[in-house]
């Protein structure tokens, strides 16, 4: 019988379970290459610094602050569709972070495991299903729900104490989400 310090573990996906951060950074740069190399460098730096947050937040910031252009629903839809086309297959094929799959395989039957991703929820669910990983998780969450909101939802739905849930991630957004929800 397993005894765990935690009642559940919540994982970020990109960079935590699979090595997909570089693909996503490249795709952000590709989206904005028509604006020149200087913008591409600023966009990729922004993407690297703000991993874990919704692509829509990033698109808005880039359009309004780096490009000085209006950000409309149509712009958002076009950017999101092109971004998904650029990254989907590469994320499905991305290598696992060393030890991640082994950990999930070893513990998913004894410990509830969740995903909290900045990727749109429909898309992250599809990616995880295509990778054959969906059986490993109790549930999978994505944007537009924030990491803080996801953690609070998991805590409320399962009546777990915050200190009994662990958030595992690779970005400041993951840390802030855990701190705001008072999880480890």
Image (tube, rainbow, N blue to C red):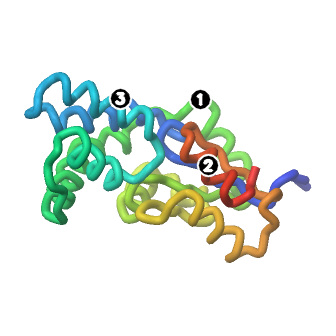
Q: Earlier in the sequence, mark 2 or mark 1?
A: 1
Residue pictured at 18% horizontal, 57% vertical: 71
Q: Characterize the local packing of mark 2: few (<14), some (14-19) or many (20 or more) Cα atoms within 10 angstroms.
A: few
| Badge 3 element | helix
Q: Position of residue 165 (x, y in %)?
A: 76, 57
Mark 2 against mark 1, which lies toward the viewer?
2
Q: Earlier in the sequence, mark 3 or mark 1?
A: 3
Separation (CA) of disc 2 from disc 1: 24 Å
Q: Earlier in the sequence, mark 2 or mark 3?
A: 3
| Badge 2 element | helix
Q: Nearer the viewer, residue 66 or 119?
A: 66
Q: Nearer the viewer, residue 171 or 1?
A: 171
Separation (CA) of disc 2 from disc 3: 20 Å
Residue of label 2: 176
State the quadrant of the N terminus: bottom right
Residue of label 1: 98
Q: Position of residue 182 (x, y in %)?
A: 74, 57
Residue pictured at 37% horizontal, 38% vertical: 93
Q: Position of residue 10 (x, y in %)?
A: 64, 54
Instruction: Answer whether labels 3 and 1 touch (C-beta < 8 Å).
Output: no
Q: Is residue 44 above or below residue 12?
A: above
| Residue 164: quadrant of the picture | bottom right
Instruction: Answer whether labels 2 and 1 touch (C-beta < 8 Å).
Output: no
| Badge 1 element | loop
Q: Nearer the viewer, residue 78 or 67?
A: 67
Q: Which mark is residue 45?
A: 3
């Amino acid at each position: 019988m397993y005894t765990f310090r935690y009642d559940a573990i919540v994982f970020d996906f990109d960079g935590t379970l699979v090595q997909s951060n570089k693909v996503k950074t490249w795709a952000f740069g590709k989206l904005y290459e028509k604006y020149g190399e200087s913008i591409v460098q600023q966009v990729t730096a922004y993407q690297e610094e703000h991993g874990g947050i919704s692509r829509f937040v990033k698109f808005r910031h880039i359009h309004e602050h780096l490009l000085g252009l209006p950000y409309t629903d149509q712009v958002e839809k076009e950017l999101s569709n092109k971004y998904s086309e650029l990254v989907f297959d590469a994320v499905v094929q991305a290598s696992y972070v060393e030890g991640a799959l082994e950990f999930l395989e070893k513990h998913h039957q004894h410990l509830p495991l969740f995903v909290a991703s900045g990727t749109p929820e429909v898309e992250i669910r599809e990616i995880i299903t295509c990778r054959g990983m969906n059986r490993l998780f109790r549930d999978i969450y994505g944007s537009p729900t924030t990491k803080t909101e996801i953690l609070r939802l998991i805590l409320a739905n399962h009546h777990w104490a915050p200190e009994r849930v662990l958030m595992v991630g690779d970005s400041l957004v993951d840390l802030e989400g855990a701190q705001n929800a008072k999880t480890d």
